[in-house]
Amino acid sequence: MPEADLVDLKFRLYDGSDLGPFRYSSTSTVEMLKERLISEWPKDKSIVPKVASEVKLISSGKILENNKTVGQCRVSFGELASGIVIMHVVLQPSLAKSKHEKKVDDAPRKIVCSCSIL
C-alpha cells in the first residue's frame, strides 16, 4: 500500500489523554476506527464504551459518519504534509443504560391549566 494512502490518527479522550497514534488506510471506515478504539480502550478509565454507537468521532468540528472512509473525511483533515490528525472522542452511552442509571420520579404529575372563556 503506498505511503500516501495512509493517515496517522491520534484520538483525544474525554479526560484529555490520547490514544494512538495509529496508522490507517484511506479506505478504512469511521466505524472501523471506532471498533479499534473500543478494543484499544484503556482499562483504567472510569467510562468504557461497549459498542461503536456509543462513540462519536469529531474532526475539525464535524461529527464523522460511520459509513464514510478516512479518504472521504480527508477534506476535513486538511492538507497535512506529514502530521498526525487528532480526533476528539465523545462518549454517548446508550439510551437504555442511561434510563436504567437515572432514577426518575415516575409518579403522575398534576397539570394545572388556567383558561378563561369569554
Image (spheres, rainbow, N blue to C red):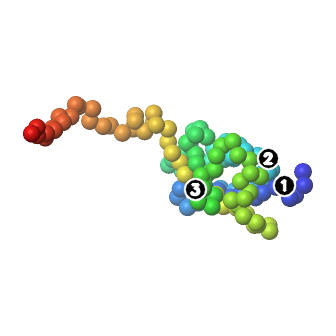
Residues packed near mark 1 inside 10 Å, few (<14), some (14 to 19) or many (20 plus)? few
Residue that carries the numbered disc 1 in the rendered image: 5
Q: Earlier in the sequence, mark 2 or mark 3?
A: 3
CB atoms at circles 1 and 2 under 8 Å apart?
yes
Q: Position of residue 48 (x, y in %)?
A: 55, 45
Mark 1 is on which residue type?
Asp
Position of 110 relative to 71 (above/below): above
Separation of residues labelled 3 and 1 (CA atoms): 25 Å
Q: Residue furthest front?
A: 118
Mark 3 is on which residue type?
Leu
Counting every numbered tag in the picture gives 3
The residue positioned 59% from the left and 52% from the top of the image is: 63
Residue that carries the numbered disc 3 in the rendered image: 13
Residue 20 placement, left or right of 12: right
Disc number lying in front (2 or 3): 2
Residue 99 placement, left or right of 77: left
Residue that carries the numbered disc 2 in the rendered image: 27
What SS does tag 2 mark?
Answer: loop
What SS does tag 1 mark?
Answer: helix
Position of 9 relative to 47 (above/below): below
The residue positioned 22% from the left and 31% from the top of the image is: 108
Residue 38 placement, left or right of 72: left
Separation of residues labelled 1 and 2 (CA atoms): 8 Å
Q: Residue furthest right?
A: 2
Look at the image and tell me whether residue 30 can be seen. yes
Q: Position of residue 4 (x, y in %)?
A: 86, 58
The residue positioned 26% from the left and 36% from the top of the image is: 105
Q: Earlier in the sequence, mark 1 or mark 2?
A: 1
